[in-house]
């Protein structure tokens, strides 16, 4: 993970409170991000390439997000069409939810999309729609305010096979490190779905239109023309008050309905390997220990061109495709691979990472900062079928049956590293983290998705009165779970207070009563 800089908060825990306007400085776009601390708000100007990692309601410490400590709770929303709604201003919405915007115009004038579903009224910022639907990485985040951006990322495109197959020849400016099947499917959907492409391009056209009409205003609120989607489902994190829900984050949606069934693509990183019996080189060098990545904060310094940019995995946003698509990779050049005897070379850096300072701006020739990329995209066939419906029903039952409980639901993805990190269908396995506060006590309930019939108990652990420590505790529990191949680590559990509840086939009410009894350990 990359540390946000500048960071004027020292070692204090602050919350990402709101995301505001964008502004152009030194020919680079920046986004205004508000962090709340001690009943005050500080706005940082960050490169717009940071947008994929910005989630409202997430605590931060030393520039790093505490993913398991997000505010809000889980909702599953079904709506007739995302485009059926209207735009309102943030100042009118936020006061309903007691969200204070500190009388800052760059926060108050943000655009919010509102729609109705199943008796509830929902509100979501245009910026969150842009982040979740269009910017899974730095490349696309930097493209949203560039005219004709999607076309500039492609050198050739066409339909074949009576429209069933599409072809894309990607521009060399796209790093090879993000060029995989998921990105190709996603970009193909953006590029060939006319409604989606128009929606993407509307971000730039709306911003420039606003800039022309408001010449004296220093910064610009982003606005998206919401695309027609047909019926869609969304899993979201939000807060509810009086039958109204403020959506803080879209965690998954089945919005993607690509107008093709196969996509063929070329990129300079696609190489055909030609093997020879020539001697192969083995490089030996002193590798430096990897250090924290820190965002460049010096204006005027630019990232250098590099097709092999390190990719930082972020908390994923799931995009479910409504039908399967085949991805065919076409080689663009050849690369010779020697398979003869080894010889030793001491020249070169050997891949050791020397630079701590990294950039999220657009790379240019002559730049000196090491560029990095993000990946917050997970392509799937569904955002459902995790086998957690009964558990969430039980939690909702507890919330209604015991009004003295303060309950919130957070969903996180298990860390990678073992087979257990993923479900059999290839999706990342998730864990539901329920925070329960009763009187002066607070607990976490951890329930891991096991639709593949792993035997894994529900885990209950008490909270520590420190969000940073709670983050480390839960991350350690989940990491040890993965390394222990789907079993809670006995050696780690010996170090903490905890309770385990075995699963049974009883109804959610009986399950809830067993959970309640455990709060008294």
Image (cartoon, rainbow, N blue to C red):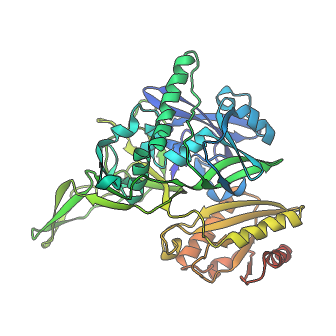
Quarter of the C terminus within the rendering:
bottom right
Q: Could one spot residue 378 in this view of the protein?
A: yes
> Based on the displayed image, in which of its 4 quarters is residue 462 positioned?
bottom right
Q: Is residue 123 left or right of residue 325?
A: right
Q: Is residue 476 above or below residue 367?
A: below
Which residue is drawn at the image coordinates 75% and 68% (left, top)? 393
Q: Is residue 244 above or below residue 382?
A: above
Which residue is drawn at the image coordinates 56% and 69% (left, top)? 429
- Could you tell me residue 467's position as x and y percent? 70, 56
- Could you tell me residue 405's position as x and y percent? 86, 62
- Count the numbered circles shown: 0
Q: Nearer the viewer, residue 90 or 517?
A: 90
- Could you tell me residue 40's position as x and y percent? 74, 36
- Could you tell me residue 433's position as x and y percent? 69, 65
Q: Is residue 273 left or right of residue 399?
A: left
Q: Could one spot residue 172 in this view of the protein?
A: no
Which residue is drawn at the image coordinates 58% and 74% (left, top)? 480
**Extreme residue toward the top, this view:** 216
Q: Nearer the viewer, residue 126 or 290?
A: 126
């Amino acid at each position: 993970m990359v540390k946000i800089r500048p960071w004027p908060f020292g070692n204090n825990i602050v919350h990402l409170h709101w995301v505001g306007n964008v502004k152009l400085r030194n020919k680079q776009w920046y986004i205004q991000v508000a962090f709340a601390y001690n009943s005050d708000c500080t706005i940082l100007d960050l490169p717009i390439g940071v947008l994929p990692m910005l989630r409202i309601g997430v605590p931060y410490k030393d520039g790093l997000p505490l993913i398991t400590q997000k505010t809000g709770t889980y909702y599953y929303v079904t709506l007739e069409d995302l485009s059926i709604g209207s735009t309102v201003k943030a100042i009118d919405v936020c006061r309903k939810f007691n969200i204070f915007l500190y009388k800052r115009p760059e926060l108050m004038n943000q655009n919010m999309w509102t729609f109705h579903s199943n008796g509830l009224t929902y509100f979501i910022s245009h910026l969150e729609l842009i982040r979740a639907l269009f910017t899974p990485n730095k490349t696309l985040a930097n493209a949203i305010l560039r005219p004709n951006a999607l076309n500039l990322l492609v050198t050739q495109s066409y339909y074949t096979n009576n429209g069933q197959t599409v072809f894309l020849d990607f521009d060399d400016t796209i790093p090879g490190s993000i060029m995989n099947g998921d990105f190709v499917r996603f970009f193909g959907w953006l590029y060939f779905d006319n409604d989606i492409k128009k929606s993407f391009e509307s971000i730039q056209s709306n911003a420039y239109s606003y800039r022309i009409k408001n010449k004296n205003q220093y910064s610009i609120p982003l606005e998206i023309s919401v695309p027609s989607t047909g019926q869609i489902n969304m899993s979201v994190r939000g807060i509810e008050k009086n039958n109204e829900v403020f959506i803080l984050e879209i965690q998954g949606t089945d919005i993607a309905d690509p107008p093709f069934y196969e996509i063929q693509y070329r990129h300079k990183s696609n190489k055909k390997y030609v093997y020879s019996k020539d001697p192969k080189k083995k490089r030996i060098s002193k590798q430096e220990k990897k250090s924290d990545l820190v965002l460049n904060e010096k204006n005027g310094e630019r990232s250098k061109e590099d097709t092999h940019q390190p990719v930082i995995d972020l908390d994923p946003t799931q995009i479910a495709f409504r039908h399967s698509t085949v991805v065919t990779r076409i080689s663009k050049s050849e690369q010779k691979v020697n398979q003869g005897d080894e010889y030793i070379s001491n020249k070169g850096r050997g891949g050791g990472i020397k630079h701590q300072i990294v950039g999220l701006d657009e790379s240019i020739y002559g730049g000196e900062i090491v560029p990095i990329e993000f990946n917050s995209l997970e392509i799937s066939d569904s955002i459902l079928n995790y086998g957690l419906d009964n558990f969430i029903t039980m939690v909702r039952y507890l919330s209604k049956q015991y009004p003295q409980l303060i309950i919130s639901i957070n969903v996180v993805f298990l860390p990678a590293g073992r087979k257990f990190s993923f479900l059999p269908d290839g999706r990342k396995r998730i864990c539901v983290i329920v925070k329960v506060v009763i009187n002066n006590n607070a607990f976490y309930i951890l329930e891991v998705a096991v639709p593949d019939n792993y035997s894994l108990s529900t885990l209950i652990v008490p909270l520590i009165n420190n969000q940073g420590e709670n983050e480390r505790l839960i991350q350690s529990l989940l990491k040890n779970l993965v390394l222990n191949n789907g079993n809670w680590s006995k050696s780690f559990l010996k170090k903490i207070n905890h309770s385990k509840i075995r699963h049974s086939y009883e109804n959610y009410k009986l399950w809830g009563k067993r959970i309640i009894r455990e709060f008294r350990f």
